[in-house]
Amino acid sequence: MVTLDCASQKAQLQEAQAALTAATQLKAINERTMIQSGIGALAAATAAAEAVKAEASVRTAQQTLTKCSIKAPFAGRVVEQKVQEHEYVQVGQPLLQILDDSGVEVEFEAPPWWLAWLKPGTAFQVAIAETGRLYPAHITRTGAMIAPGSHAVKVMGEINGRTPELVAGMDARLIIKQPK
């Protein structure tokens, strides 16, 4: 979704990898020399510690590079870009607003007496003004309370199937038939 400029972090990784190579080679040389000519145990232990330190530096640099690419938590559409290129952002600051378009949700209010027959799974149709088409849909859930002002209950539904031509906020008319 977003890729950041991480040239500095990549250079830090290369530096850490070079330090690791040098520390690993020094450790190996010190181990061979210790066996052959009795180099001090302290020098060998120091070289081993430097190799471990260099390995940790490489892992830290690799971890930093994983933050150079930001993936969306779900497939969807970008609604709004919250920051511009070259702008500094704080940790946790939203960069984009993303809309999950995997399913198109329909929200409407219904009279409370409809709750006797309007249940999750109930089929209905949605007429979308902008496309001029009818879409099959079904109820996913009903609200838990009746709104005091409107004396209506909130009902949520979902249009069946994939509908990439639909965009959030389109005008719709619902066609719901009460079962007999």
Image (tube, rainbow, N blue to C red):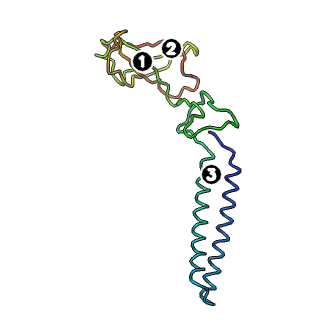
User: Around disc 3, counting alpha carbons within 10 Å, would you say few (fewer than 14), some (14 to 19), or many (20 or more)?
Assistant: some
Badge 1 or badge 3: first in the primary sequence: 3
Q: How far apart are marks 1 and 3 (CA)?
A: 49 Å
In contact (CB < 8 Å): disc 2 and disc 3: no
Q: Which amino acid does label 1 sit on?
A: Phe
**Residue hosting label 2:** 172
Would you identify the image quadrant in which residue 18 lies? bottom right
**Image spot of residue 53 (x, y percent):** 58, 66
Q: Nearer the viewer, mark 1 or mark 2?
A: 2
Image position of 11 with respect to 126: above or below: below
Q: Distance between the residues labelled 1 and 2?
A: 12 Å
Q: What residue type is labelled 2?
A: Ala
Give residue 154's mark: none
Badge 2 or badge 3: first in the primary sequence: 3
Image position of 100 with respect to 91: above or below: above
Q: What element carries label 3?
A: helix
**Image spot of residue 119 (x, y percent):** 33, 21
Give residue 124's mark: 1
Q: In this view, does 65 lie to the left or right of 121?
A: right
Q: Distance between the residues labelled 2 and 3?
A: 46 Å
Image position of 121 with respect to 5: above or below: above
**Image spot of residue 113 (x, y percent):** 30, 12
Identity of the residue furthest to the top in this view: 150
**Residue hosting label 3:** 65
Q: Nearer the viewer, mark 1 or mark 3?
A: 3
